[in-house]
Image (cartoon, rainbow, N blue to C red):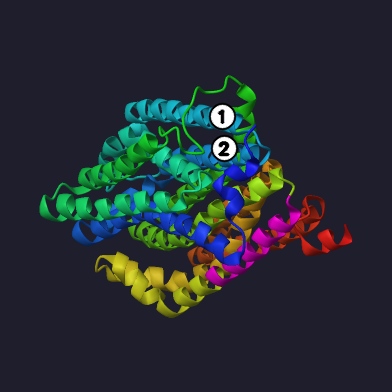
Amino acid sequence: MENVDSTALAAVKGSRRILRFALPSVLMMLMISSFNIVDGLFLSNFISTDALAALNILMPLFSLLTAVGFMLATGGSAYVSNRFGRGEPDRARASFTLIILTGVEFALSASVLGLIFINDLVRFLGADDSIAGLTAEYGMVYVPFSVFLILQFMTNQFLVVNGKPGTALALSIVGGVLNVILDYTIIVIFGWGMGGAAFASGVSSAIPAIIAIILFCNRKADLHFTRPIRDKSVIIDTCSNGVSEMVGELSGGVTTLLFNLVMMNYIGPDGVSAISILMYVQFLALAAMIGYSNGVAPLMSYRHGAQDKDGMHEVYLVSVSFIMAVSISIFVVMELFSGSIVWVFSGGSESVLSLTKHGAIIFSVGFLFMGGNLYASSLFTSLSNGKISALISFIRTLLLLAPLIVALPYFFGIDAIWAAVPLTELITFIISGALVKHYGKSYGFLKETRQAS
C-alpha cells in the first residue's frame, strides 16, 4: 500500500496554500462559463438581441448536460480523493477510469437523442416563431459537441484531484481564448451567425478536453487511466454523492425555463433578453463561487478520509472567509455599475437596456447570500453526504425559486419577478447555516466541536 501522503493533496496546508490551490479552479470555471457569455456578447452586438434570446432558450438543455457532468465530476472527485486519503490508490485510479467512461457513454446517448428531437425541444423550451429557427440552428451544431462539454467539466475537476489545478486552469484559458478568436472570426468576419457561434463554443470545449484525456494517459501521475473497476457501487456512490450538484444544475435549467416562459408571456423576446443578461452576470458569479468550492472540495474529502479534523477546520475557515469576500464584492459591483454591465449586452436596444437596469438593482441582492448556499452544498458533497447537499440544492431551486418565479408576477405584477432570486437565496441561507452548524458537530470541522472533544 502507498503512503497516503504521496498524493499532492496532503501537501496543501495553510490558508495561503489553500487559496493558491483553489484559485486556478475559480479562474477555470470563469473561463468555462465564459463560452456562452462570449457567444451572447457577439450575437447581441453583431446579429440581434433576438439571437441572444434564442441562445438563452437552449440554456435548460445545456443545464441537463452539465448537470450530469457536475454530478460525476464532484461526486467522483470526492470518492477518488477519499480513497487516496484512505491509502487505496489502486482503487482510486480504477474508479476514476470507470467514472470517465460513464460520462462519455451518457454524453454520446444524449447527443443522438438531441439531434433527433431538436425541433421539438426548441418548441418545448418556449421559443416562438420569431426565434425558433435561430435556436434550432445553434442546437443542431452544438449538440454533437456534448461529449466534450461533459468531459471538460470532469477532467478539470480530476486534474485538481491529481494536484494539477494550474494545468486545469491553463487548459481552460486555452479554451476561453480560442472561443473569443473563433467567435470573432466566424461571426464578425465570416458572418456564419448562430451556427458559427455554436461551432466556436464546441471546438473550444473539445480541444482542452482532448488534451486532458491525453494527460491522464501518463502512468507516472498519481491519478491516471487504468483498467476500470467492475463495481457498480462506485457509480452509485458517485451519483448519490454528486446528486446535489446535478439537482442544482438541473434546477437552474428549470428556473431558466420558467424565467423564459414568464418573460415571453408578459413581455416577449425583450423580456427574455433582459433576464438572459442578468443570468449571464449570475453565471459569472456562480462560476467564481462554484470554482472555489470545487477547488477546495478534494482537500476536504482527503482530510475527511484521513480523519484530519484540524485540517478540515482550516479548510472550512478559509472557505467561509473567501466566499463572504466574493459575495459582498459582487453585490457592490452590481449595485454601482449595473448600468455599464447591462449596456455591454444590450446590443443598442433601449428597451432591453431600460428593462434590465431596472431589474438588476433588486436581482443583485441575491448575490449576498448565494455564495454561502453554494459552499454549504459543496461542503456536504465533499464530506460524502449527498443527501444534505441535495436537500440544500432542492430547497434553493425547486422548492423556493421555481414557485416564486411564477407566483410573484401573477400576484404582484411582472416587476416582482426580480425579487424571486433574493428571497430564495435569503431563506436558503438561513437553512444552510443551521445545517452546517448542526452537522459540523458530528464531522468535527467546527472549532467548538474539536475543543469539546
Instruction: From the viewer's perspective, tell me whether residue 182 is left or right of residue 305.
Output: left
The label shown at residue 95 is 1
In the rendered image, the vertical position of residue 198 relative to residue 225, given as above or below: below
Q: Which residues are magenta?
A: 308-326
Q: Of helix, strand and loop, which one carries label 2?
A: helix
Amino acid found under the numbered disc labelled 1: Ser
Q: Which mark is residue 190?
A: none
Going by the numbered disc 2, the residue's amino acid type is: Gly
Where is mark 2, residue-wise?
76
| Point 53% across, 32% down: residue | 96
In the rendered view, tell whether residue 194 sits above or below residue 140.
Answer: below
Look at the image and tell me in which quarter the C terminus lies.
bottom right
Looking at the rendered structure, the number of numbered marks drawn on it comes to 2
The question of residue 161 being in magenta is answered with no
Residue drawn at point x = 32 percent, y = 29 percent: 115
Q: Indicate whether 38 appears above or below 346.
A: above
Q: Are marks 2 and 1 in contact (CB under 8 Å)?
A: yes
For residue 116, what is the image quadrant?
top left
Residue 121 visible: no
Of residues 220 and 20, the one drawn nearer to the viewer in this rendering: 220
Q: CA distance from mark 2 to mark 1?
A: 8 Å
Q: Position of residue 431 (x, y in %)?
A: 72, 58
Whether residue 56 is visible here, answered yes or no, is yes
Observer-nearest of 221 and 264: 221
**Residue 328 at x, y percent in the picture:** 55, 73
State the SS at label 1.
helix
Q: Nearer the viewer, mark 2 or mark 1?
A: 1
The answer to which of 414 and 9 lies nearer the viewer is 9
Magenta segment main secondary structure:
helix
> Is 231 left or right of 450, judged from the image as shown?
left
